[in-house]
Image (cartoon, grey):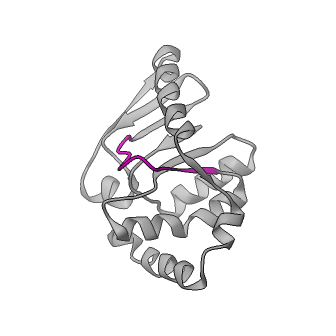
Amino acid sequence: MAITTPYFVPSEAMRSALCSAAFRGVRTCLVLPAKNDSWVVTAASRSYYYDLLEAGVRIFEYPHGLLHSKSLTIDGEIAIIGSADLDRRSFDLNYENNILLKSRSLTSALRERQMSYVSASSELTGSDIAEWSMGRRLWNNSIAMLGPVI
């Protein structure tokens, strides 16, 4: 499963589902922009990295501008694309939509594009997160408390 999204501020249920999938052995890859147009979203997103990495989710940060792709590919035959980000605002306030596709050829093409983002990105590890200063981690976690209103 590969996910690309510019704004990642998941609900507890969404975060839990991603971690559960990775714990079950589902290869789970998350591609986010290294720099976002919202410093609040960047901080909140990064507050979730440690738990996701511990569960086995691979996290990549795309360095070439704001990666605005919103896509999900699953098992080589299911894809989701649309306007909704993985944040509460997209689902609860903005009424954004995605489309579910069941097509090996379309999913393959989308997966190829996602892998081009991965190959251009830097993978983050638990060691990278451990090197963040206490101040940076505190900042990220403090901003994440605003998640329901971000």
Q: Quadrant of the N terminus?
A: top right
Q: In which quarter of the image is the C terminus?
A: bottom left
Label count reads 0
Residue in the foreground of this view, choosing between 67 and 73: 67
Q: Residue furthest left?
A: 94
In the picture provided, is 18 more to the left or to the right than 87? right
62 is within the stretch colored magenta: yes
140 is within the stretch colored magenta: no
Residue 126 in the image: x percent, y percent?
Answer: 70, 63
- The residue positioned 74% from the left and 46% from the top of the image is 24
- The residue positioned 68% from the left and 58% from the top of the image is 125
Residue in the foreground of this view, choosing between 78 and 134: 134
Residue in the foreground of this view, choosing between 17 and 136: 136
Q: Is residue 57 above or below residue 79?
A: below
Q: In this view, does 135 lie above or below 108?
A: below
Residue 9 in the image: x percent, y percent?
Answer: 44, 62
Q: Would you identify the image quadrant in which residue 25 lies?
A: top right
* Residue numbers of the magenta segment: 58-69
Q: In this view, does 112 lie above or below 48?
A: above
- The residue positioned 63% from the left and 59% from the top of the image is 52
Q: Would you identify the image quadrant in which residue 92 lies?
A: bottom left
Q: In this view, does 4 lie above or below 142?
A: above
Residue 118 in the image: x percent, y percent?
Answer: 55, 39
Residue 104 in the image: x percent, y percent?
Answer: 53, 16
